[in-house]
Structures are given as structure tokens and as C-alpha cells.
Amino acid sequence: MHKIVMALIVAAAALVPAAGARAHAFLDHASPAVGSSVPTAPTVVTIWFTQDLEPAFSNVTVTNETGQRVDLGNTRIPPGSLAELQIGL
């Protein structure tokens, strides 16, 4: 009986994903909202992710409907909000 219980515990532990093992942050939400159209450009686009970002590997480009880049190139992760990315327009 002890061997069966131990085998079940080992099998269950193998099925549980390790906490923090995700390799990538995924988009959570944005302002303006993803896929939206706005009548006038906001001064900043803010994007929130599912986990903290690594500044060295975090960048965003904003383009208009013709594909022309319209951002200021000043991507930043605000202090104290490491899952948030901002870029000025």
C-alpha cells in the first residue's frame, strides 16, 4: 500500500507545473484597447503583461494604418510596475 501511495504522489507531482517556469510574458491588456481605433492619438500607449518584463528584451513599435512608425522610440518600464510597458506618441 505504501508503494502505491508513493507512486501516486510522485505521479501527481510530475503533473504540477513549476511555479514561475513560464518563459514569456503574454499581453494582458492595453490602453488604448487592443484592436481599437481612436479619433486622436493618445500621448502614451500603455501595455500590461501577465508577468514582469526584462527591460533589456522589452520594446514596442507603434505604427499607423499605413505602417509608418508614429511612436517616439522612448519605451520604458515604470519603476514599481515591472509588468507594464509604456511608449510615447
Image (cartoon, rainbow, N blue to C red):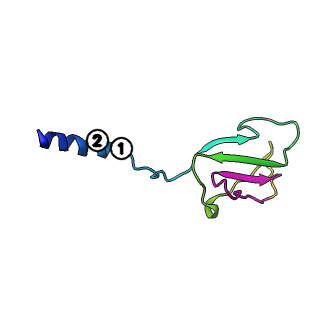
The image shows residue 29 at horizontal and vertical percentages of 66, 40
How far across and down, in percent of the image, does residue 10 sit?
A: 24, 46
Q: In percent of the image, x 76 and y 50: which residue is there? A: 62
Q: Residue 20, percent across and down?
A: 47, 52
Question: Within the magenta stretch, is there residue 29?
Answer: no
Cα separation, mark 2 vs mark 1, equals 7 Å
Q: How crowded is mark 1: few (under 14 residues within 10 Å), some or many (20 or more)?
A: few
Q: Tell me what residue is drawn at x 30 percent, y 46 percent.
A: 14
Residue shown at the point (80%, 42%) measured from the top left: 65
Helix, strand or loop: magenta stretch: loop
Amino acid type for the residue under numbered disc 2:
Ala
Tell me which amino acid carries mark 1: Val
- Give the left or right position of residue 14, taking residue 23 as reference: left
Looking at the image, residue 26 lies above or below residue 72? above
Q: Quick one: label 2, few (<14), some, or many (20+) residues within 10 Å?
A: few
- SS state under label 2: helix
Left or right relative to 39: residue 35: left
Whether residues under marks 2 and 1 lie with C-beta atoms below 8 angstroms apart, the answer is yes
Image quarter for residue 35? Answer: top right
Magenta region: which residues?
73-89
Q: Is residue 76 magenta?
A: yes
Please name whichever residue, 36 or 20, is drawn nearer the observer in this view of the structure.
20
Q: What secondary structure is marked by label 1?
A: loop
- The residue indicated by pointer 2 is 12
The tag on residue 16 is: 1
Residue 34 coordinates in the image, percent (x, y) = 70, 38
Q: Quadrant of residue 30?
A: top right
